[in-house]
Image (cartoon, grey):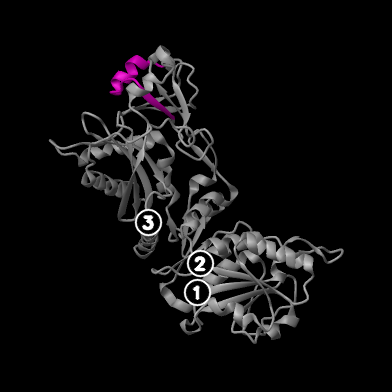
Amino acid sequence: MGVVRGVILDESVLLAESDDDKTVSLLRPGAESLIQTLVLSRTHSGIAHGVGLPDDKVSVLKKFASLNSLDCFILNDHVSEVMAGWSNADDGSVIIYLISNKKEFLPKLSSYNWLVVVLNVGGESLCHNPNILQIENLEEFPLTICHLNKRSIGTNAVTVSYTMKPSRVEDFAKRGAFPLCPTQNGLMFVPLASKLPLSSQLKGVDIVLHKATDEILSIEDNKITFTQNMQALQRYLDQHQDFCVIDPLSNVYPLLDRLEIQQVLLGLVELNTEGKYLIRGAHFLKADNFDEFDFATGLAEARLSLPCIVKPKVACGVSDAHKMAIVFRVDDFKNLSVPLPAVIQEYVDHSSTLYKFYVLGEKIFYAVKKSIPNADILRKSSNGDELKPLLFDSLKSMPTADSITSNEPIDLKLVTDAANWLRRRLQLTIFGFDVVIQEGTHDHVIVDVNYLPSFKEVPDDISIPAFWDAIRNKFDSRVPK
């Protein structure tokens, strides 16, 4: 049996029937989610229905197919014409026909060269038929495809189960990052289904890829509360220490705390050589209270001068983690509406130029983006002589210059050394960090570090294979405990 290259969904697994009149009331629970997974995983998919299906039901199927750019056809003697472009008969690939337990159709399906999978909803078991596979609900189907592919290509196949918010899944998947069909290095990606028992899913999975910051409900007194699904995953990983995860939550935690990551960046001093440009973190100071602290003295002791940028200590995962301010006068720290505790960070004049670096395993990429203007420009735009604090959300309304004005070259070797140092220090597989170059000193200053960034500024044909290689290499290099 070959690799699965296409999926046909029978009407019976998509349309729900009411108990009263047997008419279509809605799509079967899980149908839309399954279609989305198939489409985003770039699995060639279609919808088939019988000859005598009522027009209203056909209309529902055609509309659903059109919305998702799927083939929709009648299951009749002309199916072979419809299927001509689906796969090469000589490549050994397989097409799956997914149907509910409609026994009367099964003999007809045997005349096509398809693998039949039956959604057995409360019906009689068909286990006596060796040519038919069975699943109990639609959420099982993507993992079933992975199992079939692994059986086909052998031990080189690796199943990666991912969990992150839907918008992030869509962002990655639209760039081809999450295929169900094996990549060139043998990876298959399947979503972690919240409606299925976690342990039963992970028995058939080799790696878990997560964006834990999408699953944070709150962070109070340094205690992180995750969603129930993430808590369950955390318990499973605690009980299965040898399970491959990208990346262990304990390794991600430092990136959730701006103060902790600033302290990590202090270690970059070991990379610096006298007479050459410096790589460093920004100077910083912790603030627990804006009203009682002696900022004039505290700023001087921390080697800070005004203006400063003030950020919440919590770096991500909660609604106000990106609520920030640029402060021009000491008196304006009082009553500042930035969540406490906060980190007061050096504001680096950097000619409105930000370098975003992405570490994907041992490969490093970067992109150049427009950034916040220099302090003198901000002063001119801050309500005349009042110089009121400039408040913004760094994800939505960060003040950005009209253009990049830096003519200073970046020292790529220096930043690459820092990237590798951070990778070893943090023990992370995929992360990103932002670098600005200080005017005058040419110091390379790391101002932010984040976990599992989108890296969408890097062309897909370069970044996605590197993404797959990073995951595969982490799996291959794991040390069994």
268 left or right of 287 in image: left
Rendered view: 479 above or below 290: below
User: Would you say residue 355 sits in the magenta stretch?
Assistant: no
Q: CA distance from mark 2 to mark 1?
A: 9 Å
Q: Amino acid at mark 1?
A: Asn
Which structural element holds mark 1?
Answer: helix
Q: Amino acid at mark 2?
A: Leu
Q: CA distance from mark 3 to mark 2?
A: 18 Å
Q: Nearer the viewer, residue 326 or 405?
A: 405
Which is in the foreground here, disc 3 or disc 2? 3
Q: Which mark is residue 180?
A: 2
117 left or right of 226 in image: right
Q: Residues within 10 Å of mark 2 (few under 14, many from 20)?
A: many
Q: Which residues are magenta?
A: 293-311
Q: Mark 2 and mark 1 in contact? Answer it, CB < 8 Å.
A: yes
* Residue occupied by mark 1: 149
Q: Which mark is residue 25?
A: none
User: Quadrant of residue 363 in the image?
Assistant: bottom left
Name the residue furthest right: 20
